[in-house]
Image: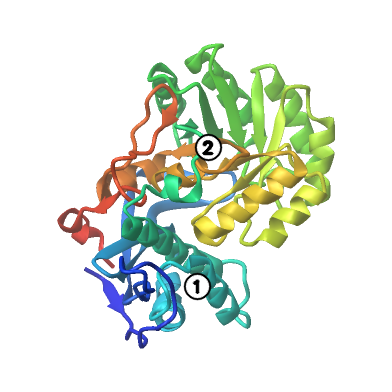
Amino acid sequence: MGEVRSRPRQASASGGGSAGNGQRRPDPPIREITVAIYTVPTDFPESDGTLKWNNTSLVLVRAAAGNETGLGYTYADSSTATLIRDRLAKIVEGRDAMAVQQCWQAMVHEIRNLGRPGIASMAISAVDSALWDLKARLLGLPLCTLLGQVRDAVPIYGSGGFTSYSNEQLEAQLGGWASSGIPRVKMKIGRDAQADRERVRLARRAIGRDTELFVDANGAYQRKQALAQAESFAASAVTWFEEPVTSDDLEGLRLIRDRAPAGMEIAAGEYGYDAGYFRRMLEAGAVDVLQADATRCGGITGFCQAAALCTAHHLELSAHTAPALHTHVCCASLPVRHLEYFHDHVRIERLFFDGIPEPAAGTLRPDLARAGMGIALKEKDVRRFAA
């Protein structure tokens, strides 16, 4: 199945828990971390303002302790799986399955000389999410209950509208989401500024006046060009302009945030890999809404850190893609506004997992009858995608 394994560490004697007779017993040690790589072709060639692709790779982690196995994953290059197998699994195995943040800190320490952004953080993300899922399963709790549930369901927005789509495909996809009851949709822009203006007008026509329209340039524009586009998009009642310029240009984001038309919010943050990145973006006043992605920013632990920063700065948080992984943590995070229901990841998660939440009235609702994230791998169905 494309699965790679590492040798388990010796079990730790530390930990807590009640044996039922007043004595302490060790919590279950993490017995094994395994990782598998899958590559799934897209259903149509896709592009945004700066990239083109025809497949998506999923790196799946399983963390075992006691009689339970937790699942976590990231959408990343196969080298991410190599790092998990060769470095991170050895650091985590044998540790207390209840001490997830201790495991997270140990992984961060281990990759010090590799660099925190990029592959290293995505590797930590997949392992951390698997460990949180494992802990919740060991306790027999839904993950949102373990984290502290603050809402019953998380609002979503339909996301796709790739620049490679024809106008007819664009209208059909966005209009379909609006007709299904999803009250906000997002499209890609940035390949051709003039064509973008017409595509936005067509999108508005397809979804009607009552559905919010978001646009995402993936950093494709320059500052003045982005401002001009914002003025044009305002005529189509665009309320969300994501990465109008590169997210590395905090001054540029702040400029556009200050000068954008009333009612149009500036968003960025999906490429954040650590809390320091989010802190700098927030302190620069670069965004109206911060984005974070638990498959990149250090897993569930890292996402909760981003949420805490948003709370401190009195700004809202939006979860980027991977809806099956984000549903529970979004329902346990106070500043979360909504979750991206991204076409590629929805399609992959339906292929890969049983138990994924399905949209209802524009929201995703965690299944509180299932422990952990509530998802189970479709072992036989996914073999054909194994690397």
Q: Which residue is mark 1?
A: 103
Q: What residue do we see at 53% from left, 75% from top? A: 107
Which of pointers 1 and 2 lies earlier in the amino acid sequence? 1
Q: Nearer the viewer, residue 112 or 190?
A: 112
Above or below residue 92? Residue 37 is: above
- Image quadrant of residue 9? bottom left
For the N terminus, the quadrant is bottom left
Mark 1–mark 2 CB contact (< 8 Å): no
Is residue 296 among what the camera can see? no
Expressed as whole percent of the image width and height from the top left, the position of residue 207 reads: 49, 17
**Residue behind mark 2:** 150
Whether residue 324 appears in this view of the structure is yes
Q: Which amino acid does the dot numbered 1 rest on?
A: Cys
Mark 1 or 2: the one toward you: 2
The C terminus, quarter of image: bottom left
Q: Secondary structure at mark 2?
A: loop
Give the left or right position of residue 312, taking residue 93 as reference.
right
